[in-house]
Image (cartoon, grey):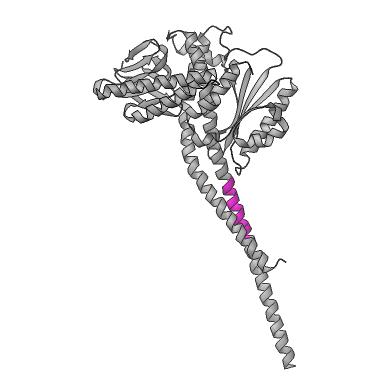
Amino acid sequence: MANLKSLRNRIRSVNNTRQITKAMKMVSAAKLRRSQERALATRPYSLRIRAMIQSLAALAPTDNALPLLARPPEGARKIQLIIYTADRGLCGSFNSSVIRATRARVAQLTREGHQVFLTFVGRKAHDVMKRQFGSMVRDVHVGMTRNLTFDAVERVVTTKLLSDFDAGHFDECHIVYNAFKSAMTQELTWRQIIPATVEQNQAADVEKAVASPLFEPDEETVLAALLPRNIAVQLFQALVESNAAEHAARMTAMDNAVRNAGQMLKRLSTTYNRTRQAAITTELMEIIGGSESLKG
Amino acid sequence: MSIVIRTELVTPEALVLSEEFMLVTAPGVEGYFGVMSGHAPFVTLLKPGVLSLGEDEDAKVFVVAGGFVEVMPDKMIILTERALPRDQITEQQIQSELKEAHLKLADPDLEPSASAFWQNRIEFAQVCQELLKKQLA
């Protein structure tokens, strides 16, 4: 049985840990509320711009005049993945689930003969994957969540991505991030952003609903301007969603940690009290034994 | 048919407003245009300019940085990257934005897609300045 002093130290350290995790939980809860609002505020724009593209793509001529919409060639392609994770850990399986999914996807794409490039938004995935996939890494953007504005994302991530695309560095782009579902759940989401995906039946429905509108200057110009905007907004949306999901995940993880620390404290103090009791009993026995022998 | 048109002003960061107005004037790429209820379906691009919602003195005025407008007979959706309300424009902020944009454009390594972004910034700032001047006059 452990001695009293080491037990006391152990209890103190567990208690300290519990206080830290509790504080982190409170901080995450406060941040979650704010980031959740942001994540939800992005959805209207994103929904509307996608609806506009759907209806336009159905009307526009289907030739490959617009590279952002054109099907890439069959066979081996250059595929760009953008991976969203947190800059910091201690948030349960938030980062690891993204990393696991990315690993699997990279392996699959490489097997199929595609050339893969990776861009990281957030430090964690890069830290883990740089050794294995170092040669594929194209960019790492760290600290994006500190200034969470559309503007910041556009000037750092979007402009780079679009000029890489224009320069022919890749012909397909997918993003992976944790979408914010609720404070308890995140959903790992893959989305193809280049070329833009147009669901055929949905497009047909929209076309029926909206009598062909007037365009100024014309369909193609409008569509050509919409597509890069859509990419910008999707990149931004992924970041704010991922940010909200990160705080939610951290809050849940820290809540569990606080609970576990509490249970551990309970067990430890039981052991501590028992040990103390045993020591007192032993001492008493010794005193009684001693006085009995003197009477003798 | 209703005499007002439901108007939504949306930026990537928020749904700025969703209200009903008699008249909306917006800066289209081919010139300013006005929209009232019952307008024909219409889609256009916006350029940086002044968006005014409502009439005369009561109008809510924003400077927008370009975007898209979709007009339906009873509804109008304005998508823009940035919408700055008139009363939040300050000379100081505009100056610093202009300076930053000019600085970035002077950089020879600037990527082409980034230069369009900063060009747009400058136009946005110029519209703000003009609006400020008009207010003072």
In the rendered image, residue A263 lying in the magenta stretch gets the answer yes
Q: Position of residue A135 (x, y in %)?
A: 71, 27
Q: Quadrant of the N terminus of chain A?
A: bottom right
Seen in the picture, residue B129 relative to A59 is either above or below; the reply is below
Q: Is residue B39 left or right of residue A79?
A: left
Q: Position of residue A264 (x, y in %)?
A: 63, 57
Seen in the picture, residue A289 relative to A241 is either above or below; the reply is below
Looking at the image, which is closer to me, B99 or A112? B99
In the displayed image of the protein, which residue is found farthest to the bottom?
A296
Q: Is residue A295 left or right of residue B120?
A: right
Q: Quadrant of the C terminus of chain A?
A: bottom right
Q: Position of residue A42 (x, y in %)?
A: 47, 29
In the rendered image, residue A103 lying in the magenta stretch gets the answer no
Picture quarter containing residue B119?
top left
Q: Residue at x 58, y 36 (%)?
A: A186
Q: Is residue B36 left or right of residue A266?
A: left
Total numbered labels placed on residues in the image: 0
Picture quarter containing residue A261?
bottom right
* The magenta segment: A253-266
Residue A105: tell me if it is visible. yes
Residue A181: tell me if it is visible. no
Helix, strand or loop: magenta stretch? helix
Q: Is residue A127 left or right of residue A40?
A: right
Q: Position of residue B34 (x, y in %)?
A: 32, 14
Looking at the image, which is closer to me, A147 or A264? A147
Looking at the image, which is closer to me, A259 or B53? B53
